[in-house]
């Protein structure tokens, strides 16, 4: 069975659930909550004509889809001023690619001393980085709504901002988050949770509907529906069944976690490529454990993508670097189609089990045959 990104990213489930909302092993099961979550409507501050949204990345390591999807959705929506922020000066590694962001935390604070209206916190390699945590807490103190994506919830939880609030994260960390942060009212079987000034999302694919939910909070449901159609999904409900992914054993034949990828994969990039399509492609192949992906371009010059992110190419085409496979050019009109394209190719090239494992981790019901 192959389901489309439109189904996966809006909450189509692998199996049905009948459990009522209840606390299970320190988690609240939200599967039967009577109403979907809503991010509170935007209220203008500081005389701004539209909100200021910051997406923050940790230089040493940030998860590419968690960062690029919120950036891409919010930037293409046109309903906010969107700024990419690195914790410190220098490039930001978003495995497997590298980006140069627009501002550092320090320069952003100088430009916007009153703070952002919303900040997105993606999953990062070190969820206890002092500079990142200081900036998140400082922005919250200035009135920003803090939105975590996937494992980014661990960084926000480390600030204490989730204490006493409802929150969620990736299905794989359910017991760990309960142990590490017992003051948080952790939820499962929900795509995103909006509890006042803190919002949190489930696994990788949840970043799309969470971002659309913010568009709705800022500009209303009609605009949100238009942006959703533009990126290739047909809804953004918080309804979700993470248990369906957790209960599937996935691919027992995957390489061990410390295995060295044996395929050098080239992803052709050029100015104007879509950030979301590039991120979903790079992450899907990287999650197989078989490939080491690189951005390949005509030169090493930085490339500005469709909505303002800047990618730093790894390899110059034709420079003699060993490349085992080169992907086709990114031409996904609907950004979400890139994940379907990648999973179909992964299933064909590396096997259905490899594609299944990637899909399960991304909470995406892809090639499961």
Image (spheres, rainbow, N blue to C red):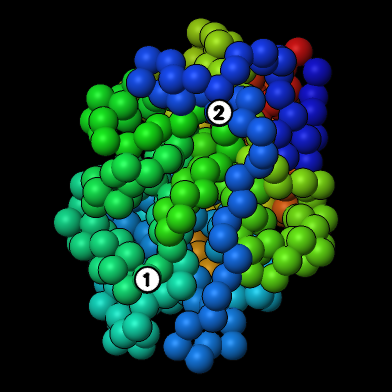
Tell me if label 1 and label 2 are in contact, CB under 8 Å. Answer: no
Residue 302, percent from left and from top? 49, 72
Q: Give me the residue at 36% from left, 88% from top.
A: 111
Q: Is residue 164 above or below residue 12?
A: below
Measure the C-alpha gap from mark 1 to mark 2: 28 Å
Labelled disc at residue 30: 2
Q: Which residue is mark 1?
A: 143
Farthest residue, direction front: 34
- In the image, what residue occupies the spot 35% across and 83% down? 114
- How many numbered circles are shown? 2
Q: Is 82 positioned to the left or the right of 84 in the image?
A: right
Q: Is residue 135 left or right of residue 218?
A: left
- Residue 80, position in %: x, y? 59, 76
In the rendered structure, the answer to whether residue 52 lies left or right of residue 49 reads left
Of helix, strand and loop, which one carries label 2?
Answer: loop
Whichever of callouts 1 and 2 sits on the residue coming sooner in the sequence is 2
Tell me the crowding category of disc 2: few under 14, some 14 to 19, or many 20 or more residues within 10 angstroms, Cα based: many
Q: Nearer the viewer, residue 235 or 301?
A: 235
| Spot occupied by residue 367 in the image (x, y as percentages of width and height) | 73, 22
The 10 Å Cα crowd at callout 1, few under 14, some 14 to 19, many 20 or more, is some
* Residue 268 in sight here: no
What residue is at 77 percent from the left and 67 percent from the top? 223
Look at the picture and state if 99 lies above or below 240.
below
Residue 84 image-quadrant placement = bottom left
* Residue 365, numbered circle: none
Q: Secondary structure at mark 1?
A: loop
Tell me the quadrant of the picture where the N terminus can be found: top right
Q: Is residue 156 visible?
A: yes
Q: Position of residue 250 (x, y in %)?
A: 56, 13
Figure check: 59 above or below 100: above
In depth, the one of 91 and 132 nearer the eye is: 132
């Amino acid at each position: 069975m192959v389901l489309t990104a439109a189904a996966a990213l809006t909450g189509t489930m692998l199996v049905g659930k009948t459990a009522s909302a209840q606390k299970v092993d320190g988690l609240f099961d939200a599967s039967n909550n009577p109403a979907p979550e809503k991010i509170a409507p935007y209220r203008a501050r500081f005389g701004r004509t539209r909100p200021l949204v910051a997406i923050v990345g940790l230089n040493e390591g940030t998860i590419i889809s968690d960062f690029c999807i919120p950036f891409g959705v919010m930037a293409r929506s046109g309903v906010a001023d969107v700024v990419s922020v690195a914790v410190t000066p220098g490039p930001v590694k978003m495995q497997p690619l590298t980006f140069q962001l627009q501002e550092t935390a320090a320069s952003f604070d100088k430009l916007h001393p009153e703070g952002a209206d919303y900040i997105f916190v993606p999953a990062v390699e070190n969820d206890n980085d002092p500079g990142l945590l200081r900036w998140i807490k400082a922005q919250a103190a200035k009135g920003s709504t803090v939105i975590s994506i996937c494992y980014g919830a661990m960084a926000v939880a480390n600030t204490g901002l989730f204490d006493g609030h409802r929150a969620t994260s990736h299905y794989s960390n359910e017991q760990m988050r309960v142990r590490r942060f017992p003051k948080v009212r952790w939820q499962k079987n929900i795509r995103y949770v909006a509890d006042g000034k803190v919002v949190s999302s489930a696994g990788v694919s949840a970043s799309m509907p969470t971002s659309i939910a913010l568009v709705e909070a800022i500009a209303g449901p009609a605009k949100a529906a238009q942006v959703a159609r533009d990126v290739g999904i047909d809804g953004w409900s918080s309804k979700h069944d993470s248990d369906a992914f957790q209960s599937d054993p996935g691919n027992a034949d995957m390489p061990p976690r410390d295995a060295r990828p044996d395929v050098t994969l080239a992803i052709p990039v050029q100015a104007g490529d879509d950030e979301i399509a590039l991120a979903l492609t790079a992450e899907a192949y990287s999650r197989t454990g078989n490939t080491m992906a690189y951005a390949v371009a005509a030169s090493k010059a930085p490339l500005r993508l469709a909505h303002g992110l800047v990618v730093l190419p790894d390899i110059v085409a034709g420079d003699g670097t060993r490349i085992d496979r080169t992907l086709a050019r990114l031409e996904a009109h609907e950004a979400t189609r890139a994940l379907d394209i990648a999973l179909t190719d992964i299933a064909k090239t590396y096997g259905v089990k490899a594609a299944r494992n990637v899909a399960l981790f991304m909470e995406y019901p892809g090639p499961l045959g």
